[in-house]
Amino acid sequence: MDPASRSSVIIVGAGISGICAAKVLAENGVEDILILEATDRIGGRIRKEAFGGVSVELGAGWIVGVGGKVPNPVWELAAKSSLRTCFSDYSNARYNIYDRSGKIFPSGLAADSYKKAVDSAIENLRNQQETDRSGDFSRDAEPPSTPKTPIDLAIDFILHDFEMPEVQPISTFLDYGEREFLVADERGYEDLLYKMAQDFLFTSEGKILDSRLQLNKVVREIQHSRSGVTITTEDGCVYDANYAILSVSIGVLQSDLISFRPSMPRWKMEAIEKLDVMVYTKIFLKFPYKFWPCGPEKEFFIYAHERRGYYTFWQHMENAYPGSNILVVTLTNGESKRVENQPDEETLKEAMEVLRDMFGPDIPNATDILVPRWWNNRFQRGSYSNYPAIINHQVVQSIKAPVGRIFFTGEHTSERFNGYVHGGYLAGLDTSKALLEEMRKEKERNSQNQSFLLEPLLALTLTQTDSSVSGSVQHKSDIPNHLHLSGKLSIPGPIS
């Protein structure tokens, strides 16, 4: 194999973790890197699309955790890029709950129902902690008091599917502050990744033209040994490297997209399987005019239905893009998967029936719909990871731990910030620093090995030279070929 074709590090996946890790390596002198990305773009689950005349975010849409004493690193990147954002205040959503006849539940009833749900969730958490100290958990454990009425179901959905901090303190809010800002910029949230990439990859007119980023390269097999990694892509290309950083999603790790030779150790696979994969679907609907309330504290509204999570959480886009006449409804998990597997016309019909329940039969039909499909996307298989409330710290460490020369990164490797963009960003930083440290140690081991091998050779050569009884000087050609000390020391075989 031509050593020139071997990279120091191959990064699989060009989401925020992969790009961040690559940037740190390049800044630390590891420039012979190669990024293999399965799709035709960078960004991963940060993805914009043109819809209804504006730019909408199909995946990550908010910068969460702003306004605290410590600045959120993603908020700092956004400020540097002058990315346009809007403050989102979720606290009023619970007072805009519509029943199926279009009436808004009285605020007192909504507040009582909300308090009951929070108390129940806290009690459930305490019970879990008491009965499950070991870190084992059941994926489908049902809370002791299951909500039954439409309003209780709607509030339960908001609490648990939108990770409200009242239930348990969220690290992001504790560390960075409790404010959340919606990205509303035509360049898209992904602009932050392009700015990062420009720092170390050759870019012209906003396009990355550097051969170290290879798009449409679907990694299917990773062979690994003590001496390196060999990666094979779907189009039959083979790439060699000293190390690999795997920055694919937890959903992909749980799927059979990438096979490992030899297989991943059991402790690794068991830890990966323990993580929940959340599916979060933002469905965008475009209308000829707006018919929903748009005043202060009306950005979010809720639909209470007998079926939990059925077109429950709505948002208008007027704050982000005034005059865009776009509504967004968020589905999660089971409902997301159901909708992904049906035609968009069927989803549009369902959404319109819900809107007519809330706002009456005379509202206009939507003129366009956009339904992202994160679950059926084989390069994502979900939206983000979710650590159960009670989990053994060791599981997190096992998910993060390298296997030989393969390092793992991504939002799912961040114990404090999994599921968030800043979690992915910080994971990329951590993984690249850990790899740089490993490379430094390997270099040290190699130089020790070399001097260890070199010492006896030096001694042998000097003895042969000095021990000529007749006083004649031993000729250089009498020393075996690989012992020549002039110029490079040539030792047969690689040094591991």
Image (cartoon, rainbow, N blue to C red):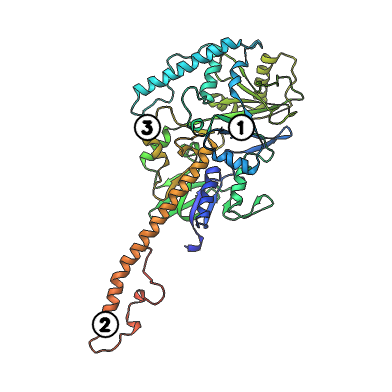
Visible in this render: residue 170?
yes
Q: Residue at x 69, y 38 (%)?
A: 186
Name the front one of labels 1 and 3.
Answer: 1
- Marking on residue 392: 3
Q: State the quadrant of the C terminus.
A: bottom left
Determine the secondary structure under disc 1.
strand
Determine crowd level at label 3: few under 14, some 14-19, many 20+ residues with C-alpha closer than 10 A: some
Question: Where residue 114 sits in the image (x, y, percent)?
Answer: 53, 15
Outermost right residue: 288
Tell me the distance, in whole angstroms, between the alpha carbons under discs 1 and 3.
Answer: 32 Å
Question: Where residue 85 sits in the image (x, y, percent)?
Answer: 65, 34
Residue highlighted by disc 2: 466
Question: Where residue 450 sits in the image (x, y, percent)?
Answer: 35, 65
Q: Which amino acid, by three-letter code, is at mark 3? A: Asn
* Depth order, front residue of 39/131: 131
Name the front one of labels 2 and 1.
Answer: 1
Tell me the distance, in whole angstroms, between the alpha carbons under discs 3 and 2.
Answer: 65 Å
> On the image, which quarter does residue 346 sit in?
top right
Outermost left residue: 469
Q: Residue at x 36, y 39 (%)?
A: 267
Residue highlighted by disc 1: 181
* Depth order, front residue of 428/100: 428
Determine the secondary structure under disc 3.
loop
Question: Where residue 185 sits in the image (x, y, percent)?
Answer: 68, 37
Q: Which amino acid, by three-letter code, is at mark 1? A: Phe
Q: Are marks 3 and 2 in contact (CB under 8 Å)?
A: no
- Marking on residue 303: none
Visible in this render: residue 379?
no
